[in-house]
Image (spheres, helix red, strand yellow):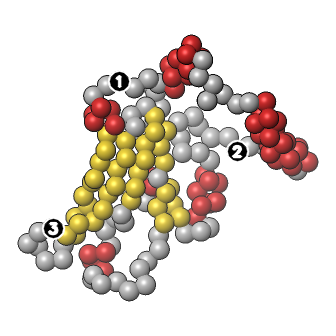
Amino acid sequence: MPEFISSAVAIHDPPTHAILDKQATAQSPNRLVIQLQPEESITLTILAKSPGEGMRLKPVDLALDLGETFKMRSLDAYERLLMDVVNGNLTLFMRRDELDAAWRWIDPIREGWSQHDEKPKAYTAGSWGPASSSALVGRDGIAWNDEL
């Protein structure tokens, strides 16, 4: 079964002047979730006022499901790549100068790991990554969506 490649980040920044009471604003924040593979979609969840219920807010999804909208099966990543090869479309392939630039960028990082006896942090396949990734974004008051 293909894995989903999606991520959402929530920034917890309280408003400078809240016009609603604390109970109304204590609900989940508005969020934009962009899901890439294999089922591409975009969902904007906003807090909307429930009609006729005073200032009661309710999360409402505004969703675009590309598979449902276009009613056709999209090719997975490898199918698209192979079709590009067959059709001679090289836009997804790196030129030699791009490859050289990529190695110039990563080589100092690899050298730093080597000098400090560091290695990339291991984590379980299919997970959101190592726990240290949460600490990294948490320093700026940000949390991954699944940690809310």
Give the residue displayed 74% in from the left and 30% down from the top: 95
Q: Is residue 82 visible?
A: no
- The single residue placed furthest to the right in the displayed view is 115
Give the residue displayed 44% in from the left and 23% down from the top: 75
What amino acid type is highlighted by mark number 3? Answer: Ser
What amino acid type is highlighted by mark number 1? Answer: Arg
Question: In front here: 146 or 2?
Answer: 2
User: Residue 3: x percent and y percent?
Assistant: 47, 32
Classify mark 2: helix, strand or loop: loop
Give the CA distance from mark 1 to mark 3: 36 Å
Q: Judge depth for marks 1 and 3 and give the one in front.
A: 1
| Left or right: residue 25 compared with residue 134 | left
Q: Which residue is mark 1?
A: 73
Question: In front here: 90 or 39?
Answer: 90
Classify mark 1: helix, strand or loop: loop
User: Residue 108: x percent and y percent?
Assistant: 86, 47
User: Residue 71: x percent and y percent?
Assistant: 27, 28
Question: Quadrant of the image for the N terminus?
Answer: top left
Question: Quadrant of the image for the C terminus?
Answer: bottom left
Q: Which residue is mark 2?
A: 121
| Left or right: residue 126 compared with residue 39 | right
Q: Which residue is mark 3?
A: 50
> Would you place residue 19 above or below residue 63 in this image?
below
Give the residue displayed 30% in from the left and 80% down from the top: 22
Q: Are marks 1 and 3 in contact (CB under 8 Å)?
A: no
In terms of sequence position, does the residue under pointer 2 or pointer 1 come before the other? 1
Give the CA distance from mark 2 to mark 3: 46 Å
What amino acid type is highlighted by mark number 2? Answer: Lys
Q: Quadrant of residue 128?
A: top right
